[in-house]
Amino acid sequence: MIDIHHHLIYDVDDGSPDLETSLEMARIAASEGVTRIVCTPHAKETIPYNPDLVTPRFAELRTLLRGTIELSLGCDFHMEFQNVEEACANPLRYSIDGKGYLLIEFANYSIPREIDGWLAALHAAGYKLIVTHPERYPVVQRRPELIAHWIRQGCLMQITTGAFIGRFGSNAESLANEMLDRDWIQFIATDAHNPDRRPPHMKRAFDYVANRRGEETARRLFVANPQAAVEGAPWPTQPEPIGLYDGLTFKSGKKYEPRSESRGFWQRLFGK
């Protein structure tokens, strides 16, 4: 398995506080069958991305963990004006290993009016955008139609492993399962911050998805899609997402009526 969202680099954000913790997190991940971790330090106003710290500590961990687990470098990129402006001026800087896949994070309780323009600008700069943990945002739990809107704009979705076991509450659990059943998820990752409260557990979620949707689906979300993102490889074959272009009702009672579209979604997005 490949974990594409993991705060493994120590003392650069609110993730691992020290080298010992980072090594323990990597050990836990490897014991559960993770072969690669994408290190994703935050980049936002309150927790700036500092390459003078990130780069040498990433290199240190890569050396110490060689033979145990492979590492890639990405970013947990907060959607705010200055960040977007810098990312567009320096194409692919924050993407996973510079291959184009960028994990983007929203504020919990509000979505800026400018968000559609920012998404379009990042797409135009060459990024393939991955929305991190949409199931956990209270604003999205109240307005789940936003997820369909972002997918129609070309965004991919990453759900947190802990959401499937209730770690983030019943609303997040319900929304994660509904997205899974509609094939609205492309990645499942830990968003690990430490070994205890936000642990790097993957296997339980893999088994859960395999039991609910089958082994093929689990391998796509935990292995094939993350591998494509890390390698910048052609996008694997995907099932068509259900309900993106048909009126539907969420379990929350929310309804929306998007415009119809006959051509396959993944064919339009990736030219396949």
Image (cartoon, rainbow, N blue to C red):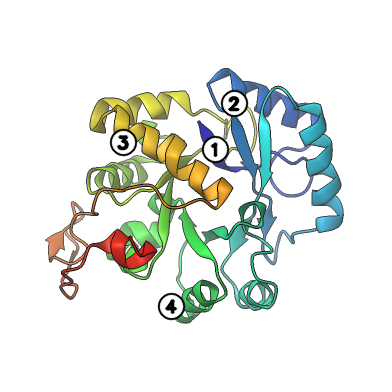
Measured from the top left, where is residue 228 in percent x and y? 49, 47
Q: Is residue 106 visible?
A: no
Q: For the residue marked with disc 4, what is the amino acid?
A: Asp
Amino acid type at circle 2 is Ala
Image height check: is 79 above or below 239?
below
Question: Which residue occupies 74% across, 27% down?
Answer: 23
CA gap between label 1 and label 3 equals 16 Å
**Closer to the eye: label 3 or 4:** 3
- Mark nearer the N terminus (2 vs 1): 1
Q: Are marks 2 and 1 in contact (CB under 8 Å)?
A: yes
Judge depth for marks 1 and 3 and give the one in front: 3
Q: Are marks 4 and 2 in contact (CB under 8 Å)?
A: no
Q: CA distance from mark 4 to mark 1?
A: 27 Å
Residue 121 visible in rendering: yes
Give the labeled residue for mark 3.
217
Distance of mark 4 from mark 2, alpha carbons? 35 Å
Q: Which residue is mark 1?
A: 3
Residue 104 pos. (x, y %): 54, 60
Which element carries disc 1, helix, strand or loop?
strand
Q: In the rendered image, which residue does mark 2 sit on?
A: 29
Mark before the other along the chain sequence, 4 or 2? 2
Of discs 2 and 3, which sits in the foreground?
Answer: 3
- Residue located beneath label 4 in the image: 116
The residue lying furthest to the top in this view is: 31
User: The residue under label 3 is which amino acid type?
Assistant: Thr
Please report whichever mark, 1 or 3, sits nearer to the chain's N-terminal start: 1
